[in-house]
Image: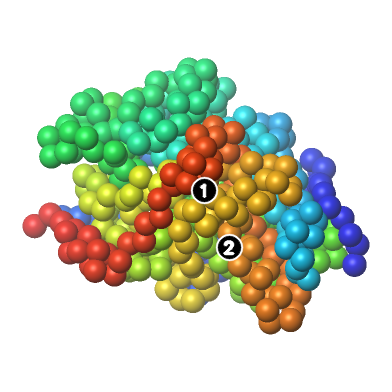
Amino acid sequence: MKKITKILLNEKEMPRHWYNVVADMPNKPLPPLNPATRQPIGPEALAAVFPMELIRQEVSAERYIEIPDEVLDLYKTYRPSPLFRAVNLEKTLGTKSKIYYKYEGGNYSGSHKANTAIAQAYYNKQEGVRRITTETGAGQWGCAMSFACAHFGLELLVFMVKVSYGQKPGRKLLMNVYNAKVIPSPSTMTVSGRRVLEIDPDSPGSLGIAISEAMEIAAEDPYTKYSLGSVLNHVILHQTIIGQEAILQMAKTDDYPDVVIGCFGGGSNFSGIAFPFLHENIVNGRKTRLLTIEPSSCPKLTKGKFMYDFGDSAGMTPLLPMYTLGHNFMPEKIHAGGLRYHGAGTLVSQLKKDGLVEAKAKMQRECFEAGVLFARNEGILPAPESTYAIAGALDEARKADIEGVSRTILFNLSGHGHFDISAYEKYFENNLPDHELTNAEVEHAISKIEFPA
């Protein structure tokens, strides 16, 4: 076995296509429904908020979709991203297992979100869109979309979840640098925002609320479209370049993962690294476990219900089949803002239902502890979201040692935490409370779901 600590690809080795898991799913995802008629909707129902090429990708069952040259050119400024073996972390743990991580924080946005931001901005520009509206939780997505829109000459309006707007001023300022306008959500700019503020003037906001605000603005202007940073099929499609690269890089080590891990908000970074390995499982008979880690305070995959629900709080989206805590659910104000979403993407939800992917929930203090341990050994300060994947990897290594076996573990280090230093300050001050949503609270949240009559 070769002992390599940093595994690189050159530009010529970079994948030229995105991988679409729908082609290989044994049970295809259920269709989105019209909330009023409960009948499946067609692509035309999405045309008011998305450009047509992204809609085609959203409903596609093609296995591979070609990456446009202009998108590849921007990818090449930071891709292929490196794969590392965490040798120092392994030594500290005293584990027999091998731990690898794919580092997605080495681009202008500091996270994996650039992979879909560039693609979405490109397709919008190609179809004559002038302005894009979007939401952002922790801010990685807003930063990614801000530069992508500036590059392609598009205006951008970002609704940033209010609690993160206050917690992470650095990300708001970076969006401003890239010429985006950033509004704390809920806001008085939209009907949906004003409704929330009427009920709770001190609302911390949620991704569901911010999505409603961004979609409302987009629907009012034919030259404005909406963009989403996770959850949807086309977003997940663009992220699969991560896992495709990782497969090529693992081959250079003469190794292959027994388990692949990513954190979970809506599904984009977990799916990005895991779905190409799922292809290997389904098509080539591999046995890699695919594990995602979500917050105990927002446990849609581990405690939520698989059902049709809205993707946003105001009910502007079609009804989507997902594991959900209810579109009105208000998560705790944890620092992993990108994981504070009430539902799981349709693709991950169906695969979880079919037993092809696994999920665990963890408390935030344990995850920050794992992030600090990782930083002290590997030198990279992880984003709060990424610490959940690290904690999952540590669990797998410790479990393997107890069982007396050696496993190969791969996780997606989806971004750095340079703009999240105040969250680490709270951790060191012992001012980072844990919170676990109980089954009774889940049942109560789901019982409050409201659909049109």
The residue under the point 32% across, 50% down is 331
The C terminus: image quadrant: bottom left
Give the amino acid at mark 1: Glu
Element type at mark 2: helix
Residue at 49% over, 76% down:
355
Q: Position of residue 306 (x, y in %)?
A: 33, 68
- Residue density around tag 2, few if under 14, some if 14–19, many if 20 or more, within 10 Å: many
Q: Is residue 232 above or below residue 171?
A: below
Within 10 Å of disc 1 (Cα), the crowding (few <14, some 14-19, many 20+) is: many
Which quadrant is the N terminus positioned in? Answer: bottom right
Residue at image position (77%, 51%) is 84
Q: State the image coordinates of residue 292 (x, y, percent, origin top left).
A: 53, 62
In the displayed structure image, the side of residue 232 where residue 80 appears, left or right: right
| Whether residue 75 is visible | no
Q: Nearer the viewer, residue 105 or 382?
A: 382
- Residue 353, label in figure: none
Q: How far, Cα to Cα, is label 2 from label 1?
A: 12 Å
Which badge, 2 or 1, is on the more N-terminal residue? 1
Residue 350 visible? The answer is: yes
Q: Say the numbered circle drawn on residue 385.
A: 1
Residue at image x 82%, y 43%? 10
Q: Is residue 263 above or below residue 186?
A: below
> Label 2 sits on what residue type?
Gly
**Residue indicated by mark 2:** 392
Q: Residue furthest right?
A: 2
The secondary structure type at the circle numbered 1 is helix
Q: Pick out the residue farthest to the left.
A: 453
> Is 93 above or below relative to 427?
below
